[in-house]
Amino acid sequence: METAYHILAGNSYTLKNVRLETAFVFDEDGVTATRTGLFCITVSNGKITRVFPNDAPLPHAIDAKGYLMLPAFKDMHVHLDKTLYGLPWQALSPRRRTVRDMIAYEQEIIPTLLKTSTARAEQLISLLQSYGTSFARTHFNVDTTSGLRSLENLQKALDNKQDSFKAELVAFPQHGLYYTDSAPLMKEAAQLENVDFIGGLDPFSIDNGIQKAIDLTVQLAIDHNKGIDIHLHDGGKEGLRTITYLAEQVLQNPQLKGRTFVSHAFVLAQLQSKETEAVAEKLAAAGMGIVSAIPFRGAAMPIPALLKHGVEVLMGNDNVQDYWSTFGTGNMLQKAHLMAELYGWVTEFELSRTLRFATRNILPLNNEGHMQWPKAGDKAALVLVNASCSAEAVSRMSATVAFAHDEGSLYWKS
Amino acid sequence: MVSRKDFIRNSALGFAGLAFVPGTLKEVNGTTSESAQTSGSYILKNVRLETGFAYENDEVIATHTALFAVEIENGVIKKISPNQPGAKNAVDAGGMLMLPAFRDMHIHLDKTFYGGPWQAVRRRTGGVKGMIALEQKILPDMLKNSTYKAEQLIELLQSKGTSFARSHVNIEPTSRLDSLKNLQKALENKKKVFGAELVAFPQHGVFYTDTALYLKEAAQAGIDFIGGVDPYTIDGAIEKTMDFTIQLALDHGKGIDIHLHESGESGLKTVEYLINKVNENPALKGKTYLSHCFVLGRLDRPQQEAIAEKLGAAQIGIVSTIPFGGLIMPIPTLLKHNVTVMTGNDSIIDHWNTFGSGSVLQKANLAAQLYGNTTEFGLSRTLKLATAGLLPLDDKGVQQWPKAGDQADMVFVDASCSAEAVSRISPVTSLIYKGNIVF
C-alpha cells in the first residue's frame, strides 16, 4: 500500500530536533545500546552544510520531532519497467517453469504491458517511497519485443518523479544477447547517456556460451564507459565459470573495478566453504560486488564470507509483484530485517551494522561507535524513521516519516 | 472496546512496516460502528466472499468472489444472503474481503517488552538455563506492568487481524501465579474484543526449579493446557516430566502443549514418548500439541514420513513459528499425513527475540515463500496457517465458510482473494470478534 507524502521544503532547509546516533553504549560483553541526541541540520542545494547542537531557537526550522535520521534507503536491484503492481491480482502459473518459458511468455505479454508501463513504474516507485526508498538501481528490458520502448517508458516515469526519486539504469537483455537477436539493441542502448550499466543474463543457459556473451558485455561497458551488472541464476560449474571469467576480464580491464556486479549469483550458495572463500577472494581482488535479494528458500547466500573478504554486497527487492514472483514488499528495511533473521544478527551491534544493506553501505556510526554520518559536505540523501536507533529500525522495520534524495525536495508523510 | 485512536497510535508505535488502515467499517446512516456493536444484531453489506475457483484445464487460475450481505446476531453469523447494497442501517464492508479472523496459536502475551523502550537481544552463554537465570533476575520487574504490556500486545495482534491467541504463560517459582493473574486481568479487560486460551508454561522446568506445585495450582486456575519445555535438557529426564504433565492434564481435563526445542535424540524420544502416552490415553487425542518440535526438521525424509504418520494417527498437532535458514520444518509432510499444523508469532519483542511482527498473515506469507506455494491454489491453501485451519473454500473450491451458526469472528482485508492476501500480506481493514466490531 502506498502512502501519500507532501513536499515540506525544497533542497535548502534547516531541520531541528533531528535524532542522530552519536555512540554505542558498551559493557564488558560489548555493545548494549545506541546513544542518540537531538541536532539541527542545515541543507543547502542538496548538501548538508552544517550539523549543530539543538539548543538555539530556530523558529523557521522544520521540526523533525525527534525522529531518527538515517542515510537514504537505496534499492539496488529492482525492475521498475515491468511490474504488475497496480494491476489486478494474478498468481504465478505452474506451467511456466524455466527462464526460457518465461521469455516466451514475455514475448506474448510485453506489447500489452508496455501500454501502461510508465504509470505502473510510477506506482511502484510510490510503493518504494512509502518505505523510505528514494533511489534504485533498476534493470530495464532490452529485447526484440520491447526494443528500447521499455526504457523510454521508464525514463518518462523517472522524469515525472525526479524531484523525489533517482535511479541508475541497467540495460538488461532479458531474452539473451543471442538466444533472441538482442545484441544490436544492446549496442544501441549502450550508447545512451541515461544508461549506467550493461546487464546480462545467464550466458551459459540462455546464450549457450559464457565467453561470447561476457565478451560482448565487457566490450560494451569499456567502449561506452559503463558499469556491468549481470543476472546470474546459473548454478554448478557453469555458474562458477561465469563469475571467474568475468573476474578475469575485470582484472585485465581495471577501469571496470568497483563498477562490476553480479546479481543473484546463486551458485555461491552451492559451494563448499573453501570454494566460497576462494571465489570471495577473487571477487574482492577484482573489485566486483554481489547484488542479492536475500533468498531464504534452500541454502542461504554466503554473505558473511563475502563481507569478510571485503566484497561489496548490495541488496534489492527485485520482483515486487509480477509473473516471476508476487512476494516483494518494496521495503528495504524488511530485506535488512530478513537478513538479520537469516544470518542470526540479533544483537544491538549486529542489527545496527545490518542497516548498511538498506543504505548502500552508509552507516551513521562506524564499528567503533564514532559518528561518521551525517557530516558537512555529505549529500542530503536521508530518511526519517520512527525508531530510537538503527538496530530498532532493522529489527522492527520502523515506519518512514520523511525522505529526500540529494537533488530533490524534502517529502513528509501526509 | 478499542478506540480507533488507540489503533492509530499503536500501529505507529508498533510494527508499522506493514501498512495498516484502521476501522473502515461504517454504517451508511453515519452513526458509528459502536451502536451496531451494542445492538447485538446487525447486517453487513458489500461483504466480499470467495465463492469458487476458476479453472483452466485442471489448473486453478483465479478465485471467484461476489458481494453478500451477512447478518450477525448475538455473536453468531445468522444468515448469508444476496447483497443488499441499498440497505439502510447496514454496516458497509466496502467490498473488502471477509476471511475467518486470524488466530495466533503460539505467543507469550504475559512476557513482552512490547510497549516499552527498544532493547536488543544480548548474546548470552549458558543456553536455556542461562536464560532461566536471566528471567529469574528480570521477571519481578517485568511483572510490575505486565497487564499493560499484554494489552498493548493484544492491540498489536488485533491491528494485524488476529482476534484469538493461544498464549503460554510463565509458571515458575519466581512469578508463581502472578504472570497468569496479570494476563488474566488483561484478557478480562479485552474480553469483548479478544479471545485466548492459556497454556500453563513451566519455563524454568518442572523439577529444575521447584515448579510442580505451582503447575498443580495453575491447573485449577482457569488455564486450558498444561505446557512444558525440553524435559531432557531442563529437567534431566524425559519420563518423569512427561508423566507429570500428562497426569496433570488427565486429572484436570486439560490439553497439552509442550515447547520442544531439542533437535537430537532426546527430542525424538520425547516425541515418541508423547505419541505412545496419547495413544494410551485417548482423552488427549486432538488436544495435545508440540510447539516448535525442531527435531522433525533434523530427520531424514523417511523418518519424517513415519513420524508424521504417527502424529496424525495420535491426533497430536504441531505449532510452528515457521523457522527458516538453518532448519526447515517438514510442514508439507505433516499436512500430507493430516497432522494439524498451526502457527504463531511466539516472541514479538522480548529478551528471546525482537523480530516478531504480530501478523500471522505474514507467517503464512513466509510459509508460502519457504515451501514454494506460489500458485493461486497453493497460496489460497496457505491461508489456513493464519486461521488455524479454517478456509473459505475447500480444496475443490466449494464454499465452506462462512455458514449460518459460525461464531462471528471475521477479519476484513483489502484483497481480492485469499491467495492475494497471503502473497501481498494485504492490509487489514477491520476486525470482528464474537460479533463485536473491534475496528
Image (spheres, rainbow, N blue to C red):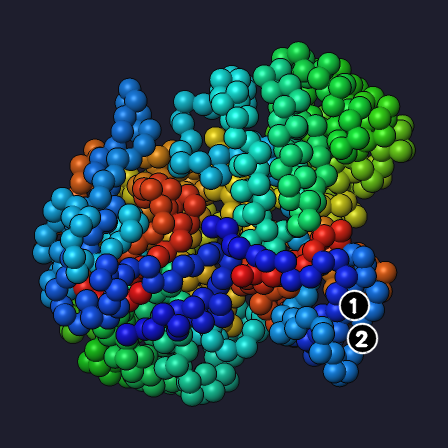
Quarter assignment of residue B40: bottom left
Q: Nearer the viewer, mark 1 or mark 2?
A: 1
- Residue B230's place in the image compared with A213, above or below, is below
Asked whether residue B434 appears in the rendered view, the answer is no
Measured from the top left, where is residue A145 in percent x and y? 58, 17
Q: Is residue B293 left or right of residue A126?
A: left
Disc 1 element: strand
When asked about the image quadrant of residue B73, the answer is bottom left
Residue drawn at x 47%, y 76% is B115
In this rendering, does residue B80 appear at all? yes
Badge 1: chain ID: A
Q: Which residue is mark 2?
A: A52
Q: Amino acid at mark 2?
A: Phe
Q: Do labels 1 and 2 touch, CB within 8 Å?
A: yes
Circle number at residue A42: 1
Figure quadrant of residue A76: top right
The residue marked by circle 2 belongs to what chain?
A: A
Q: Percent x, y for residue B236? A: 41, 70
Query: Relative to residue B375, is residue A17 drawn left or right?
Result: right
Q: Residue A361: x and y, percent?
A: 74, 53
Q: Residue at x 48, y 79 (%)?
A: B135
Q: Residue at x 17, y 46 (%)?
A: B83
Q: Amino acid at mark 1?
A: Thr
Along the viewing direction, whichever of A293 and B282 lies nearer the viewer:
A293
Q: Residues within 10 Å of mark 2 (few under 14, many from 20)?
A: some
Position of the C terminus of chain A, as image quadrant, is bottom right
